[in-house]
Amino acid sequence: MEAIPTGDCIAIGPLVARVLAPNPSPFTFTGTQTHLVGISDVAVIDPGPEDPAHIAAIVRAVAGRPVRAIVITHTHNDHSPGSRPLKHATGAPIIGCAPLALDTLGPRADAAFDRAYAPDRVMAEGDSVAGDGWTLTAVETPGHTSNHLCFALPEAGALFTGDHVMGWSTTVVSPPDGDMAAYMASLAKLQARDDRIYYPAHGEPIDNPAQKVRGFLGHRRQREAQILRLIEEGVGTIPELVERMYVGLDKRLFGAAGGSVHAHLIDLGARGRIMEDGAQWRIR
């Protein structure tokens, strides 16, 4: 894939431009993409990490136009912290997903989350923000996180998918906040829509949304079947399952893979397929 420059404002649709944050990693691919929507006035979706160079790049891309809203899909640290300095720079309200009650999620559950996120307006399913020739409407898509929202742009037949559907990989679903049953239901919800294109926060635009969602649903069902088969063979702990299921995976991603395996195990347990027996899982 051709390298994408950070800091540049690149038009990727009639109403859409993106600015890539300088935060590439095994979890963020080339980095977090901040999207600008609109022409004479704009909304800024996911301003990314609290990085002064990236915030300055967004302000340059705004180029003095009114910013109607700073819109947040979810509160991971590579998506929402930039909302605060951007609000200071533009005066725009922060709207979008709800904050999380992180202290209820268990030890270390807040490591990747923006604890200081404080929206001026929380959006729920069907809530909208609008400007000159554009509308963004919230679509609730829990799973990757419990507070995840996508945003539809009907004027372009587009959906901003945050981390729910990414252009380079399947998303991580890691308990206690990540929920596999909710994630699968959210994918099914998108499958019933007729969006023309997805703009994810990581990876290139997706011009075959129905095919992509169908593939992700199939991938998760295959993982589920793989887990059940391995448990039947006596492979019953998360580290053992990860070792058998993710051959060749970058070791830095083993923790994330373990989170997704754990999410599958919780879901399978809730459905009565397996049960936890001490540190092991076994077929019920």
Image: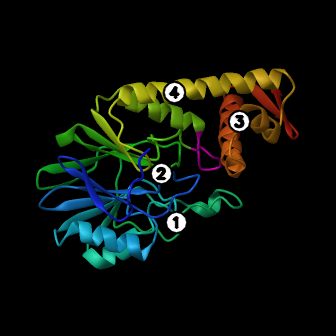
Q: Quadrant of the C terminus?
A: top right
Query: Label 2: which residue?
Result: 147
Crowding around mark 3 (Cα neighbors within 10 Å: few <14, some 14 to 19, many 20+) is some
Q: Which mark is residue 114?
A: 1
Residue type, numbered disc 1: Asp
Residue type, numbered disc 3: Tyr
Q: CA distance from mark 2 to mark 3?
A: 28 Å
Give the foreground label among 3 and 4. Answer: 3
Crowding around mark 1 (Cα neighbors within 10 Å: few <14, some 14 to 19, many 20+) is many
- Front residue (pair 78, 132): 78
Query: Label 3: which residue?
Result: 246
Give the foreground label among 3 and 1. Answer: 3
Q: Which mark is residue 71?
A: none
Q: Residue 180: x percent and y percent? A: 59, 37
Give the foreground label among 1 and 4. Answer: 4
Crowding around mark 2 (Cα neighbors within 10 Å: few <14, some 14 to 19, many 20+) is many
In the rendered image, the residue lying farthest to the front is 2
